[in-house]
Image: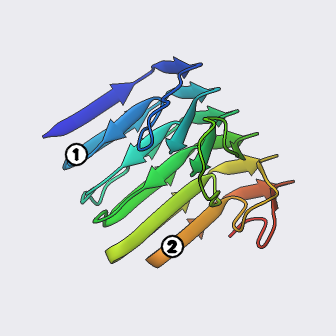
Amino acid sequence: ESLEIDNCNFINNVAPLKVSTAAVTSLCLEDVSIGSCKFINNSAREGGALHFENLIQYSDAIFSCDFEHNIAVKGSAVYVGNNSKYLSVTLSNFKKNDIKNSLGEKAQLEGGVIYVNSHEGDSVLDIGASNFEDNSNRNVDGGVIFLDGNSKVYIDASIFTNNRGRVGSVI
């Protein structure tokens, strides 16, 4: 099964449920391609814009996308959940995303514009030629990237400017 989204805008979406994502959720797809999209002002519990579970592909999943002003309890822009093996993000921009609880529920805030939860197997996050600017997760660890469990991250030719986190403004 596959999911292909190209040249779309996801703006002002809210997902109020306890386990939810405001824009796109992929629970078990082998081929995901999200390109030239804008995710602006979305709000959810896990992954303000995107949420992946069981992602197993080894090719670019997110490319040439813009993520701005997204909010979540975990992963203000992208949440990578259990059994996901690899996520590639290239040529994308992340600006002014924030970790906070806008849903009114009791929840532990956990950091990262990109949150990788890898308690069931190893996960790899591969970031290339992307920009992260003014992301503010002041009250949580991991301002831009939060690795939980058995996670690895590879970063190449990317720029991190003025990001904030309680411990680790970038990772």
Is residue 157 visible in the rendered image? The answer is no
* Quarter residue 162 falls in: bottom right
Q: Residue at x 79, y 65 (%)?
A: 169
> To which quarter of the image does residue 76 belong?
top right
Instruction: Tell me the number on the disc at residue 63.
Output: none
Q: Which residue is mark 2?
A: 148
Q: Amino acid at mark 1?
A: Asp
Of residues 64 and 81, which is closer to you in this image? 81
Q: Specify the quadrant that holds the N terminus.
A: top left
- Residue 31's label in the rendered image is 1
Give the percent coordinates (x, y) of residue 27: 26, 46
- Ranked by sequence position, the earlier of labels 1 and 2 is 1
Spot the residue most to the right. Answer: 162
Residue drawn at x 58%, y 28% is: 42
Mark 2: secondary structure: strand
Q: Is residue 83 above or below residue 149?
A: above
Numbered disc 1: secondary structure: strand
Can I make out residue 79 in this image?
Answer: yes
User: Looking at the picture, how far across and down is residue 56, in whole percent?
Assistant: 24, 60
Q: Amino acid at mark 2?
A: Asp
Locate residue 82, reporting x and y percent. 33, 64
Residue at figure coordinates x 50%, y 30% from the top left = 16
